C-alpha cells in the first residue's frame, strides 16, 4: 500500500511541476499580452535626411521600400540607412552598425517564438529571420530576470521595477537612461518611450563616459563579448557587438566598451546582455563570432532589437 501511495504522490508532484512550468511560460505570457498598454503612434516624428521621394509615412501598415540598395556592408532605402564597419581595438574585433532612420518606428523589437514568457528562447538569427529583420542584435534577455521594465514596440509587458538603470528609446528618435525608481513603466510610455530595456549599465551620458575601470555586470569577467546601443543624434543610432573569449579576440571590459562608444561620437550609450548572448545579424547572416559553451555558436535568448518594416 505504501508503494502505491508514494507512486501517487510522486505522480501528483510531477504533474503539478509540469503545470507550473507551462503556466509560467504560456498562461502568464498571454495575460501580459492581454493586459499590455500601448502608445499612440502619432507621437512619432519623420526626419527627411534619409528619405527620397518614394519614402512612406510612419504608420503601422508601412511596407518595405521597393527601391533598396544592399551589399555585405551596407543597406539603404528611403527610410533606412545602415553601414557596417569592423574595428580591431583592445585586442578584440568590434562590429559597428551605423544606422539612420526616417522614423523610430523602424527600430523594433521581437520576442523569441513571438511569445512573451520566462522560458521562451531562440537564437538571435532565427528570431531575426522570422521578423524579416535587415539588421538585428540580441536584447536584454528579459526572461532571465524576475523584475525590470519590459517595454517593447510601445507596449508594457512587465512593470515591476528593480531599482536599476533603464534604457529608454523614445518615439522622437532620442534615447536616455533613467532609473526605474523615478518613473512607472506606464509613465514612460505616456512620455513617448517606444522601447525600454533593463540590463545596463549606462555607458555614456551627455557625451561623457559614465562607468569607471572597476565597473562590471554582476559576476561577469572583466573581458567579455559585448552588445550595446548608442545614440549620435535623433534617429541616428549605432549597434555595437564585440567578439571575445577566443584566441583571436580577448573581449572588452565595460570601461573599454564605454570608451569605444564615446569614440564613435555618441551622446548616450547603454550596455545590453553580453557574453554568449552577443550576436549581430545583417542581411541574412550572423557577422560576428558568438561564443556559447566554449564554442563558436549562438546562444538562445529571449529577445532581439532590430531594424525592419
Image (cartoon, helix red, strand yellow):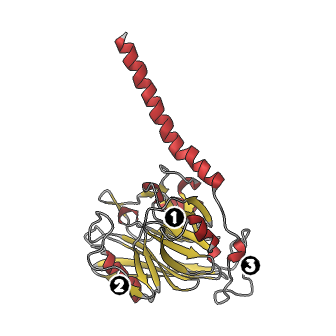
Q: Residue 76, relative to residue 2: is it above or below?
A: below
Q: Distance of mark 3 from mark 1, alpha carbons?
A: 25 Å
The residue singled out by tag 2 in the image is 259
Q: Tell me the crowding category of disc 3: few under 14, some 14 to 19, or many 20 or more residues within 10 angstroms, Cα based.
A: few
Q: Is residue 284 visible?
A: no
The residue singled out by tag 1 in the image is 304
In the depicted view, which residue is nearer to us: 204 or 80?
204
Left or right of 68 in this view: 204: left
Disc nearest the viewer among 1 and 2: 2
Q: Position of residue 84 (x, y in %)?
A: 48, 81
Is label 2 in contact with label 3 (beta carbons under 8 Å)? no
Q: Please tell me which of labels 2 and 3 falls first in the chain.
A: 3
Q: Tell me the crowding category of disc 1: few under 14, some 14 to 19, or many 20 or more residues within 10 angstroms, Cα based.
A: many
Q: Quadrant of residue 191?
A: bottom right
Q: Please tell me which of labels 1 and 2 falls first in the chain.
A: 2
In the depicted view, which residue is nearer to us: 68 or 237?
237
Amino acid at each position: 500500500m505504501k508503494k502505491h501511495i508514494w507512486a501517487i504522490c510522486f505522480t501528483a508532484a510531477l504533474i503539478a511541476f509540469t503545470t507550473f512550468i507551462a503556466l509560467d511560460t504560456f498562461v502568464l505570457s498571454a495575460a501580459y499580452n492581454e493586459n499590455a498598454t500601448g502608445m499612440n503612434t502619432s507621437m512619432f516624428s519623420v526626419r527627411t535626411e534619409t528619405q527620397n521621394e518614394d519614402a512612406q509615412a510612419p504608420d503601422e501598415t508601412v511596407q518595405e521600400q521597393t527601391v533598396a540598395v544592399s551589399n555585405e556592408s551596407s543597406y539603404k532605402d528611403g527610410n533606412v540607412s545602415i553601414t557596417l564597419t569592423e574595428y580591431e581595438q583592445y585586442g578584440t574585433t568590434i562590429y559597428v552598425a551605423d544606422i539612420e532612420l526616417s522614423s523610430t518606428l523602424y527600430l523594433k523589437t521581437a520576442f523569441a517564438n513571438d511569445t512573451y514568457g520566462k522560458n521562451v528562447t531562440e537564437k538571435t538569427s532565427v528570431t531575426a529571420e522570422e521578423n524579416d529583420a535587415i539588421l538585428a542584435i540580441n536584447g536584454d534577455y528579459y526572461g532571465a530576470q524576475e523584475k525590470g521594465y519590459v517595454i517593447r514596440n510601445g507596449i508594457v509587458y512587465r512593470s515591476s521595477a528593480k531599482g536599476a538603470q533603464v534604457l529608454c528609446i523614445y518615439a522622437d528618435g532620442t534615447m536616455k537612461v533613467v532609473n526605474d525608481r523615478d518613473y512607472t513603466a506606464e509613465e514612460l510610455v505616456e512620455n513617448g518611450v517606444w522601447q525600454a530595456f533593463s540590463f545596463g549599465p549606462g555607458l555614456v551620458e551627455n557625451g561623457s563616459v559614465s562607468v569607471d575601470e572597476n565597473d562590471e555586470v554582476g559576476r561577469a569577467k572583466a573581458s567579455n563579448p559585448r552588445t550595446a546601443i548608442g545614440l549620435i543624434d535623433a534617429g541616428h543610432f549605432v549597434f555595437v557587438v564585440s567578439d571575445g573569449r577566443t584566441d583571436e579576440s580577448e573581449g572588452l571590459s565595460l570601461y573599454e566598451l564605454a570608451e569605444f562608444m564615446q569614440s564613435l561620437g555618441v551622446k548616450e550609450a547603454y550596455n545590453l546582455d553580453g557574453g554568449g548572448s552577443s550576436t549581430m545579424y545583417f542581411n541574412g547572416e550572423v557577422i560576428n563570432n558568438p561564443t556559447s559553451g566554449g564554442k563558436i555558436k549562438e546562444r538562445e535568448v529571449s529577445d532581439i532589437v532590430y531594424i525592419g518594416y
